[in-house]
């Protein structure tokens, strides 16, 4: 009996409702309008059967979020001249710094 073995294990999905709430309270990273949390799929991951970690999110308004999924990441980044890896890292660093400094992130 043979088993298919993935060359890399399936990524573990980390969830954090407080972080998603923090992201939703930020302005859209493209338009500056009200946003929702958009999970950003890293290059080369494709469809792994599950969502990516909540820490891989960026704030986008609903129209841009829908467009992101419709046209794909590369086309979206080119169209809006944005690096979504950098955007998500900047928000994560802001969140971690605020937690470390004891800031009230409105988590309730």
Image (tube, rainbow, N blue to C red):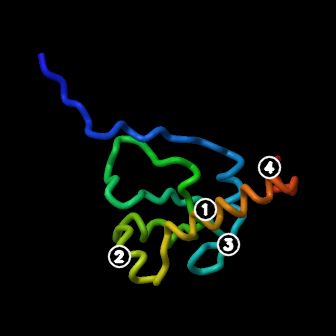
Q: Earlier in the sequence, mark 3 or mark 4?
A: 3
Q: Residue 75 bears which disc, if any? A: 2
Asked whether, in this view, residue 64 is left or right of residue 15, the answer is: left
- How many angstroms separate mark 3 from mark 4 (CA)? 17 Å
The residue tagged 4 is 107
Q: Earlier in the sequence, mark 2 or mark 3?
A: 3
Q: Is residue 89 above or below residue 11?
A: below
The residue positioned 53% from the left and 55% from the top of the image is 56
The residue positioned 50% from the left and 40% from the top of the image is 13
Q: Is mark 1 on a helix, strand or loop?
A: strand
The residue tagged 1 is 36
Q: In this view, does 50 lie above or below 62?
A: above
Q: In this view, does 13 lie above or below 101?
A: above
- How many angstroms separate mark 2 from mark 3 (CA)? 22 Å
Q: Which of 42 and 76 is in front in this view?
A: 42
Q: Nearer the viewer, residue 66 or 30?
A: 30
Q: Do the residues labelled 1 and 4 touch (CB within 8 Å)?
A: no
The residue tagged 3 is 27
Q: Is mark 4 on a helix, strand or loop?
A: loop
- How many angstroms separate mark 4 from mark 2 (CA)? 34 Å
- How many angstroms separate mark 3 from mark 1 (CA)? 9 Å
Label 2 crowd (10 A; few <14 / some 14-19 / many >=20): few
């Amino acid at each position: 009996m043979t088993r298919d073995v993935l060359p890399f294990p399936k990524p573990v999905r980390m969830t954090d409702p407080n972080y998603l709430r923090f992201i939703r309270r930020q302005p859209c990273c493209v338009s500056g309008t009200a946003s929702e949390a958009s999970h950003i799929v890293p290059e080369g991951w494709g469809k792994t059967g599950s969502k990516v970690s909540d820490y891989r999110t960026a704030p986008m308004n609903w129209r841009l979020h829908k467009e992101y999924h419709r046209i794909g990441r590369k086309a979206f980044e080119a169209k809006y001249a944005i690096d979504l890896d950098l955007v998500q890292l900047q928000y994560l660093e802001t969140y971690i710094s605020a937690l470390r400094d004891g800031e009230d992130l409105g988590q309730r």
